[in-house]
Amino acid sequence: MTAQMHEELILDGEKTSMAFCPPLPENDSRLVALKDDELEDNGMFFSTACWRRYVGTWEIRGGKFYLVDINGIYKLSGTSQIFADWFTGTLRIPKGEILQYVHMGYGSVFEYETHIKIEKGIVTKSRVIDNRNKDTNRRDLGWENLPGFENRFDGDDEI
């Protein structure tokens, strides 16, 4: 699997990205799947770097996690954002330079990472991880970061 495009995140009013793709809400009428003739001619959503064929914009505001926009094969109807009460997991927010590129999923290692634990859409804990002096195993990182596993990192159950 090719390294994947990051989801966008607005954190403390600043745009950043997540090396993680939270699941979308099931059966929410505000999330609309586009028909083929409605899709923009934007090759990035149909490349191997975007297997999910969309990029969401998420926001943490007031201790809550929201889906605020989406581009690609979906759109949000109206001007509504969606409170992500269906989501429980750990967000991984990379910062700094890439220390090790992993050509699979979200496995690349950055100088720093912020892990934010979300339970039913509510921020419960967070921590900053300094990766500058850590040994990393490219193969293990690649496997850990396959879709469905990319938000399960050592120690996240402790935050």
Image (cartoon, rainbow, N blue to C red):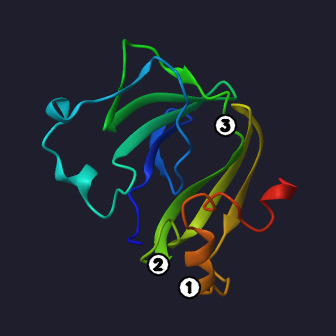
Which label number is shown at residue 138? 1
Residue, x 60% and y 57% (percent of image)? 148
User: Residue 87 occupies which quadrant of the picture?
Assistant: top right
Which label lies toward us, 3 or 2? Answer: 3
Q: Residues within 10 Å of mark 3 (few under 14, many from 20)?
A: some
Residue, x 57% and y 86% (percent of image)? 139
User: Which one is earlier in the sequence, the residue at label 1 or at label 3?
Assistant: 3
Q: CA distance from mark 1 to mark 3?
A: 28 Å
Q: CA distance from mark 3 to mark 2?
A: 26 Å
Return the residue at label 2: 102
Q: Secondary structure at mark 1?
A: helix
Residue, x 67% and y 69% (percent of image)? 130
Measured from the top left, where is residue 126 in percent x and y? Answer: 74, 48
Which label number is shown at residue 155? none
User: Where the N terminus falls, by quadrant?
Assistant: bottom left
Return the residue at label 3: 87
Q: Amino acid at mark 1?
A: Arg
User: Which one is earlier in the sequence, the residue at label 1 or at label 2?
Assistant: 2
Residue, x 71% and y 65% (percent of image)? 153
Q: Are marks 3 and 2 in contact (CB under 8 Å)?
A: no
Measured from the top left, where is residue 111 in percent x and y? Answer: 56, 71
Q: Is residue 15 above or below residue 28?
A: below
Q: Amino acid at mark 3?
A: Phe
Residue that lies at the very extreme toward the right in this rendered image? 158
Q: Amino acid at mark 2?
A: Val
Q: CA distance from mark 1 to mark 2?
A: 6 Å
Q: Is residue 151 left or right of residue 101?
A: right
Q: Are marks 1 and 2 in contact (CB under 8 Å)?
A: yes
User: Which one is earlier in the sequence, the residue at label 3 or at label 2?
Assistant: 3
